[in-house]
Image: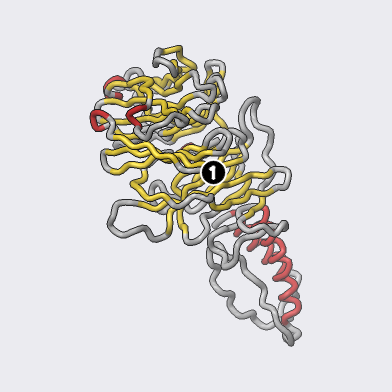
Amino acid sequence: MSTTEDRVRAATRAAAQTVAPGSTPPPPPLPARRRGRAAHPRRGRGWPGWVAPLAAAAAVAAAIATSVVVSGALSLGHARRPAHTAAGRPGTVALHPAPTAPAGLPAYNVALAPGPLAGQSTRAVVRATATGAALATVRPPRPYGTFTGVTGAADDRTFVLAAQPRQQPAASGRVLMKFFRLRLDPAAGTARLAGLPIPPVSGKWLQGAGIALSPDGGKLAVALSTGRRSVIDVFDLAGGPVREWKAQLPGGTVVGTDLVGANTLSWAADGRTLAFDAWSPARVQVYALDTAAPGTSLSASRLVMTFPDWATTGSVSGSAIITPDGTKIIAMEVPSPRTATEIRVRQFSATNGRPLGILATIHYRKGAITGWPDVLWSNPSGSQLIISTTRLSAAPSKNGDLTPEEIGTVSGGRFAPLPGIPGSQRPVW
């Protein structure tokens, strides 16, 4: 049972105690509570007198329940009518204020809570970076039933969510995705979800972050796979034309991978350079695509660096991202796969892939590294990061199970966990 339900039930019991025992006949049984719908008091004329005390008790509970729902997570997709706040705007939910984040870090992050199937979620949670507290919850509006991806702009107020319909096209192996913009307005205390003016996209969805919002929030990059051929679409969210690049990259390499990393795509702050990870059984490569240059082939992208045979060398470059200033590639590295006692957070030149140094080294007990580390956010220069890594306090896993993960910052050569943020949910900033 949720904390919200506990509070509502407790309030109901407390209010009912104000009615003297024996003063009312037994009430009729309440209908079963349906998830995502608020209970509405019955309205009508000519109620018998014995209903008044019970109605008063119910009114108290209903008022408390309403305040809890408005202050927490208001469902967008399960009510018969669009959700409204006091401002009356469809698709808008209440947003709690965020505590001040540690210096240099954004105040908000958005993560997809675990759903019925891997990679699918029925709700997105806005959390405070400082405490991990849930500040708002949104759900995909009908006919869309699950969220499958989330990405954020540099302003820490604009996010884009990918959603899938409840029923996908049959037996094609392809999925249909619709994109929604989530805007946080701390001054008004609201978070608003609205569909983007671009058509749904059909393709084989790459697990991990196959979408990336440009720093200014004006472009959305989407990576798809159609067999061995890779496709990247860039949508102009102001209504301009979509651009598409396709290629069958050398050696069976495809954009992204479902084996490592959450950062298939990452933008530089110039809004035109898009870095993407491409994977094959023998290597992981990082490319830079100039989205302002003419052409439609991904093969024209500049190869920045190659991590050969990461399973042997230990380079986990599926987590590689480009820093916002466009000068560096940040990646996670396990230098000794057989003993696996440390993860290095490394930086490389975005011009020629040359190693530039180690930002931090995280030490573990032998055999305790069983998850995939990722770089989730970087400040402009790459000197301050938010990463996901194996939980330091966890014992080595058994039977091949993944060790629980935690989210933390890398700054000044040190890793510091961020409290209260679920590591398994891979939030975005």
Which residue was labeled with disc 1?
A: 237
Q: How is the image coloured?
A: secondary structure
Residue 334 position in % (x across, y down): 36, 21
Residue 158 picture quarter: top right
Q: Is residue 219 visible?
A: yes
Decide: few, some or many residues near mark 1? Use Cα within 10 Å; few <14, some 14-19, many ≥20.
some
Q: Quadrant of the N terminus?
A: bottom right
- 373 over 187 or under it: above or below: above
Is 216 on the left-hand or right-hand side of 46?
A: left
Q: Nearer the viewer, residue 220 or 420?
A: 220
Residue 199 position in % (x across, y down): 46, 52
Q: Is residue 130 visible?
A: no
Q: Nearer the viewer, residue 231 or 40?
A: 231
Q: Nearer the viewer, residue 416 or 212?
A: 212
Residue at 69% x, 66% y: name it: 62
Is 338 on the left-hand or right-hand side of 165?
A: left
Residue 146 position in % (x across, y down): 45, 54
Residue at 46% x, 14% y: name it: 358
- 356 over 71 or under it: above or below: above
- 328 over 204 or under it: above or below: above
Residue 378 position in % (x across, y down): 53, 26
Is 36 on the left-hand or right-hand side of 185?
A: left
Q: What amino acid is labelled 1 in the image?
A: Leu
- Label 1 SS: loop
Residue 356 picture quarter: top left
Q: Quadrant of the C terminus?
A: top right
Image mark count: 1
Residue at 69% x, 78% y: name it: 43
